[in-house]
Image (cartoon, grey):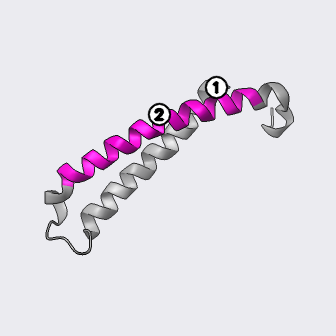
Amino acid sequence: MFTRGAVAAISGLLVGNVVFLVVLVVAGIQGIELHGVALLPYLIQIVILNLIVAVVEAVVTGFVVDYLSKVRPDLLGE
């Protein structure tokens, strides 16, 4: 169950980061001169930092799901 919880968390956070990146590249950021591809180096830094946090969140989620599968398996539908 740990793996399922961790994979679900990291997958959701990865999709969110990709959507975030696409929206900012398309729309730009109000108040700065950089637009489109010129923003990519800075946005990639943000995405990398978000993914580092996502790994921590995935581990915590994995432990929570594993714990719930032992204590209250009825909550997980299995």
Say which quarter of the image contains residue 74: top right
**Does residue 26 lie above or below 15 as drawn?**
below
Residue 8 appears left or right of 77: left
**Circle 2 crowding by C-alpha within 10 Å: few under 14, some 14–19, many from 20:** some
Q: Secondary structure at mark 2?
A: helix
Q: Residue at x 40, y 36 (%)?
A: 52
Vertical relation: 69 (above or below) 33: above
Residue 45 horizontal side relative to residue 37, left or right: right
Tag nearer the camera, 2 or 1: 2
The CA distance from mark 2 to mark 1 is 13 Å
Kindly identify the amino acid type of the residue bearing the numbered disc 1. Answer: Phe
Q: Residue at x 28, y 70 (%)?
A: 27
Instruction: Kindly indicate the quadrant of the structure image that contains residue 5.
Output: top right
Q: Which residue is mark 1?
A: 2
Q: Percent x, y for residue 65? A: 70, 32
- Outermost residue to the bottom: 31
- Badge 1: residue crowd in 10 Å (few <14, some 14–19, many ≥20): some
- Mark nearer the N terminus (2 vs 1): 1
Q: What residue is at 77 percent from the left and 32 percent from the top?
A: 68
**Mark 2: amino acid:** Val
| Overall secondary structure of the magenta section | helix
**Residue 69 screen position, x and y as percent:** 77, 28
> Where in the figure is residue 49, as x and y percent of width and height?
35, 42
Is 67 positioned to the left or the right of 62 in the image? right
Residue at mark 2: 55
Left or right, 28 with respect to 50, comes to left
Looking at the rendering, the stretch of residues picked out in magenta corresponds to: 40-67
